[in-house]
Image (spheres, rainbow, N blue to C red):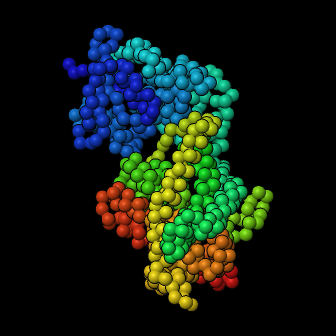
């Protein structure tokens, strides 16, 4: 006679594995299911009568309509379709007591099969800690199957659960065929789950009720996206409004440092030991290369900190997961799923961790599409570029109560990157990465107040990363550019920028980019910006510092220099270029590693450069036609 089998099924994070380990102890074996890389856990459970039962821990699933390899294995085992796997005699549905409504959707689907089934209401201690007390008997009556309260990690309810499995197993021997229940649709199942969960509540605290009501608002398909857009709008307004005093203070510090070098270096001991030419070279290196170049990027540290403060607060409060849930509907229209949202969201900080985060996406076409569009999300490295151009060309005027024009333009640039990514994803999913969008369900974390200590640590880490880039990559590229701008030396009546090595390289590039409104200085800044996007700012600052005709012109802030030398159509075209232009070389290298070749990174480079050129041109030509 074969060993009878019981299976643990349920949503991910319901505590199935903890319950499996508590019931079987060391009497378990782990392997992969034949033909797939999905873990198979089986163990021996001894019933109160002394009879052994094989207990299997099935992968977490949200539905029998499989959307991933894990869910496909669960479906096949439950339905008795997996080769070499006998159909379970008893189904044990494990529910998370603190997230009962969502878990009941899949539980109903299992119960509908009409097979011997019981429910393990797990983690009831955590639900009670959060202010929610449930009535197991009411739940049992509503579901029509036995419900046992368990706390797997404390071995609470295990004896009762084993006894219930034995009772269900005996009923399986008496009624081996089972009696399937009427099938209901998913919307009906969700409504039933809501009603059952509400009917099983004995008591709940005001805080728990508040969290439920917040979800009803924030996850509403109509109100939720409006709140998300409003929050993002406030974030970008704050980037300008709150950061201005701090950015001005940093700019004053850098101006003071340049003035100090100007006044101190000629009278220092170095003036007595260095030739005049070397001393002048050192002076120009410090003022033009380091302070004007690297310093022009560091002044945007306040904007970076404020941006990440909002992002960290949304993550710590539990709102970020809800934003991903809201975005799932939009992403489904373009052939992606909510699984792509987290990597794309990570790309707002930097595309490198965003691309690496795509490893969690099971579908290869879905993952490839996400990698290809990740650079379109506006990373923090673009913020200094946007900030300096907006501050120089967009008036700091109010367009409504608490709404500044500069913040509105910044919000539009970020929105343009998101829309661009969605449109490109739609085209890719209809062509080179054709495929169907996969489903997406995720656990919603509990709401909580962000901890100031954790926020401070997170902000310090991100500020340090920014400063480290300024002290390494940006410093190196800026100094190299300054050297190329400084030699050979210009003769009388010649422009140093024009005759330098960098200037001659830029002259070749200018031929290509001049039709879209770019000037010689922009052409020069585009190449080093491939090392890091912020270098575009330091490159422009260094170029104008080297090319300054007098000390008064050299002392002007970068924004003042740009506003006096560029036209508005050129500035707008420059912004449009950076919305679509490829990311830094490190991003391309990571894309090559994640796609195992150069085919897709080269494709990424080509289509991003094409988009950048086309939209910069459209922006420039449109602005000129409108007489801006």
Looking at the figure, which quarter contains the N terminus?
Answer: top left
Which residue shows up at 78% across the image and 61% down it? 400
Give the quadrant of residue 567: bottom right
In the displayed structure image, the side of residue 388 where residue 608 appears, left or right: left
In the displayed structure, would residue 167 be above or below residue 332? above
| Residue 234: percent from left, percent from top | 68, 54
Regarding residue 89, the answer to whether it shows in the image is no
Give the quadrant of residue 295: bottom right
Which residue shows up at 55% across the image and 85% down it? 495
Give the quadrant of residue 417: bottom right
Residue lying at the far bottom in this picture: please name it: 493
Of residues 510 and 95, the one nearer the viewer is: 510
Which residue shows up at 46% across the image and 82% down it? 488
Regarding residue 312, the answer to whether it shows in the image is yes
Count of numbered labels shown in the rendering: 0
Of residues 378 and 447, the one nearer the viewer is: 378
Which residue shows up at 28% across the image and 24% down it? 28
Of residues 585 and 7, the one nearer the viewer is: 585
Residue lying at the far top in this picture: please name it: 49
| Residue 292: percent from left, percent from top | 58, 67
| Residue 76: percent from left, percent from top | 31, 38
Residue lying at the far left in this picture: please name it: 1
Looking at the figure, which quarter contains the C terminus?
Answer: bottom right
């Amino acid at each position: 006679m074969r060993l009878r089998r019981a299976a643990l099924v349920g949503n991910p994070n319901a505590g199935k594995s903890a319950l499996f380990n508590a019931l079987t102890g060391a009497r378990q074996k782990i392997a992969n299911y034949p033909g797939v890389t999905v873990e198979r856990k089986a163990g021996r459970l001894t019933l109160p009568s002394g009879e052994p039962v094989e207990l299997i821990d099935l992968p977490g699933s949200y539905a029998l309509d499989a959307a991933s390899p894990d869910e496909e294995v669960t479906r096949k085992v439950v339905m008795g379709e997996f080769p070499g796997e006998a159909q379970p005699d008893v189904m044990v549905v494990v529910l998370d007591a603190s997230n009962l409504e969502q878990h009941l959707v899949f539980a109903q689907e299992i119960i509908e099969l009409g097979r011997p089934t019981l429910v393990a209401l797990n983690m009831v201690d955590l639900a009670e800690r959060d202010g929610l007390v449930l009535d197991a008997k009411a739940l049992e009556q509503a579901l029509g199957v036995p419900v046992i309260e368990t706390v797997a990690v404390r071995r609470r309810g295990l004896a009762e659960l084993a006894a219930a499995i034995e009772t269900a197993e005996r009923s399986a021997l008496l009624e081996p065929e089972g009696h399937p229940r009427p099938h209901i649709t998913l919307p009906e199942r969700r409504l039933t789950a809501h009603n059952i969960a509400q009917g099983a509540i004995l008591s709940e605290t005001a805080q728990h009720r508040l969290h439920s009501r917040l979800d009803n608002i924030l996850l509403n398909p109509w109100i939720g996206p409006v709140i998300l857009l409003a929050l993002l709008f406030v974030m970008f307004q704050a980037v300008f409004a709150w950061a201005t005093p701090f950015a001005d203070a940093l700019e004053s510090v850098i101006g003071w440092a340049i003035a100090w070098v100007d006044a101190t270096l000629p009278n220092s001991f170095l003036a007595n030991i260095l030739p005049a030419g070397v001393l002048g070279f050192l002076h120009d290196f410090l003022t033009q290369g380091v302070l004007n170049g690297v310093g022009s990027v560091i002044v945007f540290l306040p904007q970076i900190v404020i941006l990440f403060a909002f992002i960290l607060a949304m993550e710590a409060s539990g709102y970020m997961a809800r934003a991903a849930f809201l975005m799932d509907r939009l992403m489904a229209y373009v052939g992606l799923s909510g699984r792509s949202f987290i990597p794309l969201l990570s790309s707002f900080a930097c595309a490198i961790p965003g691309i690496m985060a795509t490893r969690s996406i099971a579908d290869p076409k879905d993952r490839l599409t996400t990698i290809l569009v990740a650079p379109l999300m506006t990373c923090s490295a673009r913020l200094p570029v946007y900030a300096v151009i907006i501050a120089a060309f967009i008036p700091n005027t109010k367009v409504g109560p608490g709404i500044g024009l500069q913040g509105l333009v910044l919000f539009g640039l970020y929105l343009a990157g998101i829309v661009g990514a969605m449109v490109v994803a739609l085209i890719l999913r209809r062509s080179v990465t054709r495929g169907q969008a996969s489903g997406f369900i995720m656990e919603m974390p509990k709401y909580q107040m962000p901890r100031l200590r954790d926020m401070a640590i997170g902000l310090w880490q991100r500020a340090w990363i920014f400063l480290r880039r300024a002290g390494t990559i940006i410093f190196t590229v800026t100094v190299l550019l300054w050297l190329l701008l400084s030699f050979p030396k210009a003769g009388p009546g010649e422009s140093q920028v024009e005759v330098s090595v960098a200037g001659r390289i830029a002259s070749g590039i200018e031929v290509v980019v001049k039709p879209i409104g770019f000037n010689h200085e922009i052409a020069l800044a585009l190449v080093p910006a491939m090392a890091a996007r912020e270098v575009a700012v330091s490159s422009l600052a260094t170029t104008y510092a080297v090319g300054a005709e007098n000390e008064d012109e050299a002392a002007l802030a970068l924004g003042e220099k740009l506003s006096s030398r560029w036209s508005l159509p050129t500035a707008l075209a420059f912004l449009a270029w950076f919305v679509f232009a490829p990311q830094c070389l490190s991003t391309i290298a990571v894309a090559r590693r994640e796609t195992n070749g150069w085919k897709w990174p080269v494709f990424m480079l080509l289509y991003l450069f094409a988009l950048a050129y086309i939209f910069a041109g459209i922006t420039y030509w449109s602005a000129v036609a409108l007489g801006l």
